[in-house]
Image (cartoon, helix red, strand yellow):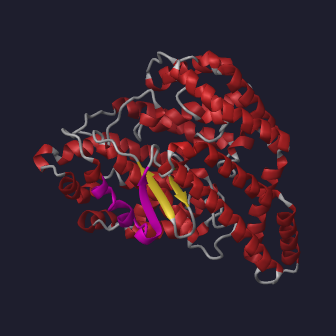
Amino acid sequence: MNELQSYRNFWKEYTRLGDIISLLHWDSEVMMPDDGREERAEQISQLSSLSHKMFTGDEAKRHIENLHNLIAKNPPEAIPLRRELEILERDRNRAITLPVELVERFSKLTNLAHGIWADAKKNKDFKSFEPTLTEITELSIEMAECYGYTTERYDALLEGYETGAKSNDLENLFLHLKNSLIPIVNEGKSYSSPFKNPIPVEFQKAFNDRLPGILGLPASASRLDISVHPFSTSLGSKDKRITTRYHVTDPLSSIFGVLHETGHALYEYGLGQMKDYPSPLTAAVSLGIHESQSRLWENQVGRSRAFWEYFYPVLLKEFNIYHYDLPFNDLYNYINSVVKSKIRVEADQVTYNLHIILRFEIERDLISRRIKVSDLPEVWNSKMKEFFDLTINDDSEGVLQDVHWSGGAFGYFPTYTLGNIYSAQLFHHFLATHESFWDDVIKRGDMSSLNKWLTRKVYSHGRNLDPKDLIKEATGEAPKSDYLVRYLKTKVQEQE
Ligand code: MG
């Protein structure tokens, strides 16, 4: 067996191990009885450490050296291998940069922190979480220093979620978005639920089961199940799992959960169809791009008039409702309702990004030591006043609402809004070259041209292009927030 083949086999084994870990996670959220929790955590931790050792160990190092030698000889197959090697080394360097002792301290601390945060949130008591969050912040700063950066410390943490993202670029994207959104939010109208009666879960399921297939996810390569929090995971190139949750009084929650998670699964399915799968290049390029795929189907498509013109009669039939009990306009207005909420996870598509920008500004200042952990409640509350004109009464509806910081995930939040920015830009350029798309949706529920376009412009590139370059190549422009602003403005203007 030659060296290239041996490297490919190594990567296949490494990928399989990751898929098995994902299966254990999926099972623990969807199927596992409660008492299995403790041993399952040990199983996952044992396999995760095996996977980490495999990636950082001597065998991987030898494969990297072999790839360098192979490329130096410059055979025809060396050209695509260059990028693959670059990605492989970039990931491995990041994984081996941190001292083992620091990683262990961080993981122990964040495991403990979850419970302390949950109690503090329940008791509306930030003070009881403050010492732990201070320790997490200090360790995160230590890690950022190990990773290194050129201009700003926060960039080192961003890099873990969004390759190539820099604080300054985000500030420019987000500042324009923030200034544009505040007046749009003030104009937005809120509508009450048009559903007069609870909708049984079986009715909702009958509707939801149609969605993944019609978006382009093959039924033979996917499953839709139920979990507390909706998620999507990949268990192999032809095995994509999505979940949603059901509330009988809020049937739209399950539908938008399915649309969002199907968007993630379509991306993963596309990556699995790439040549040379599995390789370091056949994976998602960043969280922001991943989120753009879920938001595109959830919002740009799923909240459009055309989508509901096609699905409205289907919904009436599956939900057993007469049209006069659920007028089309009441449904459509409700789907595009704008409500100022104090809670991020309850926010609509118009207000959502302001919640994210608030978190970005705060965590960036925290990691740069411009503010202290003890300042957080005050800073949070004054920004909520500035952005939304809302008054926070206690920290459970303020700074304690999200789990992210208790897990030390500084740099994660911005990827949500990057996803929204990318999705609006991608979809704008898709529509510009596909004039019949909305007609095809209204007449036949046919969205295949979008799936094909995304396969060509996004999925098939894997990690060959960094996020910014991927957007530039797909749309002809660097990422900009103008398309998202325009889209949200139109949504608010068409409210009746
Ligand atoms: Mg998502």
Residue at (56, 46) in percent of width and height: 36
Along the horizontal axis of the image, is 407 left or right of 269?
Answer: right
In which quadrant of the rendered image does the C terminus lie? top left
Residue at (48, 26) in percent of width and height: 387
Residue 325 x %, y %: 13, 44
Q: Nearer the viewer, residue 303 or 170?
A: 303
Q: Quadrant of residue 433?
A: bottom left
Write down the region rendered in magenta.
Answer: 205-226
Q: Is residue 457 visible?
A: no
Q: Nearer the viewer, residue 15 or 476?
A: 15
In which quadrant of the rendered image does the N terminus lie? bottom right
Q: Is residue 216 magenta?
A: yes
Q: Quadrant of residue 359?
A: top right
Residue 469, compared with residue 102, is above or below; it is below
Q: Quadrant of residue 171?
A: top right
Q: Nearer the viewer, residue 217 or 462?
A: 217
Residue at (56, 27) in percent of width and height: 118
Along the horizontal axis of the image, is 242 left or right of 415?
Answer: left
Q: Is residue 237 visible?
A: yes
Q: Is residue 189 magenta?
A: no
The total number of labels drawn is 0
Residue 40, compared with residue 239, is above or below; it is above
Residue 380 x %, y %: 56, 22
Residue 50 x %, y %: 75, 56
Along the horizontal axis of the image, is 343 left or right of 317?
Answer: right
Q: Nearer the viewer, residue 418 or 102?
A: 102
Residue 288 x %, y %: 57, 50
Q: Residue furthest front?
A: 35
